[in-house]
Image (cartoon, grey):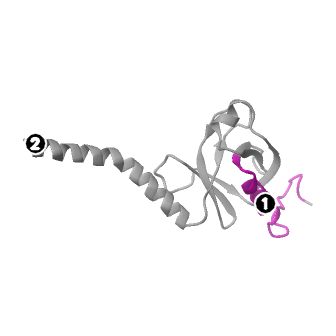
Amino acid sequence: MPWDIVIVTVIVIAVAMLPFVLLYLRRRWLTGQGGLFDCAYQVDSDQGAAWVLGVARYRREQLEWFRAFSLSLRPKVVFQRVTTMYVHQRVPQGLEAIALFEGSVIVTLRDRVTGTTCALSMASDEALALMSWLESAPPGSHYLPSSADSP
C-alpha cells in the first residue's frame, strides 16, 4: 500500500513540474537560435493598456517577439525591419515602473504600412541596439511607394 502512495506522489509531482520543464527547454532552444533579450510588449501605446512579458530576438530582417509564458516556438509578433519605424522613447511611469523589468525604457514603434503603433519595454542598451538595427537597414530598403518617408 505505501508503494502506491509513493508512485502516485511521484506521478503528481512529475505532472506538476512538466510545464516548468517545458518552459525552460523552450527558452534554451530559443536562446540557441539567436540571442534573446527580455522585452515586454504593449498592443496599444495608450497609457493604461496591458503589458505582456516576453523575450525578443533579431533574426535576419525581423525582430521576433515571443510570450514569456507560452510553449509556442513561433513568435507571437514579428516586426519587419523595412516597415518598422522608431517613434520615441520614454521612461516607465506609475504602475508601468512596477510591472515592467527593472531599469527598462519604453520604445514606441509604428508600422509604416498600416500605421499601427505599439510599445516595447526593454533595457536601455537593447533600445539603443533596436534603434541602430532599424537605422542600419540597406540603402533604399525603407522606400515604400506612396509613403511619406520615401524620397
Hey, what amino acid is under mark 2?
A: Pro
Q: Is residue 10 magenta?
A: no
Depicted 17 relative to depicted 61: above or below: above
Q: Residue furthest bottom?
A: 138
Q: Name the quarter where the N terminus is drawn.
A: top left
Circle 1 residue: 134
Say which residue appears at 41% left-offset and 53% top-offset. Answer: 22
Towards the viewer: 128 or 138: 128
Q: Which mark is residue 98?
A: none
N-terminal of the two: label 2 or label 1? Answer: 2
Towards the viewer: 89 or 124: 124
Say which residue appears at 68% left-offset and 30% top-offset. Answer: 95
| Highlighted range, magenta | 121-150
Say which residue appears at 64% left-offset and 49% top-offset. Answer: 39
Q: Is residue 144 magenta?
A: yes
Hey, what amino acid is under mark 1?
A: Leu
Position of residue 78 measured from the top left corner of the image (x, y, whole percent): 64, 54
Q: Which mark is residue 2?
A: 2
Q: Residues within 10 Å of mark 2 (few under 14, many from 20)?
A: few
Towards the viewer: 62 or 106: 106
Label 2 and label 1: CA atoms lie apart by: 63 Å
Depicted 136 relative to depicted 93: above or below: below
Position of residue 17 measured from the top left corner of the image (x, y, whole percent): 35, 47
Q: Name the quarter where the C terminus is drawn.
A: bottom right
Element at badge 1? helix
